[in-house]
Amino acid sequence: MPDIVKPSVQAFLVCDQVIEDSLTKKKSLIGIFTHLQAGVFPFQHQQMGLYFCFTDAEGAYTFDIDLIYLNNEQLICRATLPNIVITDRLQISDFGINIPSLIFPAPGRYEFRLRMEGSLIAQKDFSVMQLSGHQMTEPSS
């Protein structure tokens, strides 16, 4: 079996939403962020978008995306994308996906990990922070 060509990742971004134009296939990334804020935990974020772009790939690929809570290496969720076939190594391929309703158990650092055929090819971390003071805190007993 021939070796799988490992793509060169040019971008891996986290945002609130990815919108794809039906005619041009151009993607718009709405609300790119490096951190989220929440008043109470567990915190439910209604939707997150992921965008990744790569080149130097040829063949059929299976991609998995894991969300990891880095404070204890807990797997929060995993998504497997449908098989992707790239026919030209010089082609630039970009993808946008939206993930509904993610739940973050606690404040801390989180990381999306993009795996191709089981091998890590990109990762993007971000923080989920507790709002301080009087904003949206649970009542004390």
Image (spheres, rainbow, N blue to C red):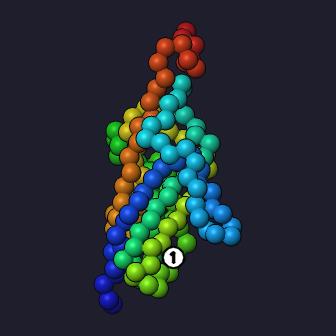
Label 1: which residue?
Answer: 84
Q: Residue at x 44, y 30 (%)?
A: 129
- Residue 48 visible at all: no
Image label count: 1
Check disc 1 and report its element: helix, strand or loop: strand
Q: Which of 56/102 is in front?
A: 56
Which residue is the extreme one toward the bottom?
A: 1
Instruction: Write the residue at 46% across / 68% down.
Output: 63
Where's residue 106, x and y in %?
45, 33
Q: Quadrant of the N terminus?
A: bottom left
Q: Position of residue 24 (x, y in %)?
A: 64, 69
Residue 126 horizontal side relative to residue 97, left or right: left
Q: Is residue 78 above or below residue 57?
A: above
The residue positioned farthest toward the left in the image shown: 3
* Residue 38: % across, % down: 52, 29
Classify 10 Å Cα crowding around label 1: few (below 14), some (14-19), many (20 and above).
few
Q: Position of residue 93 (x, y in %)?
A: 48, 72
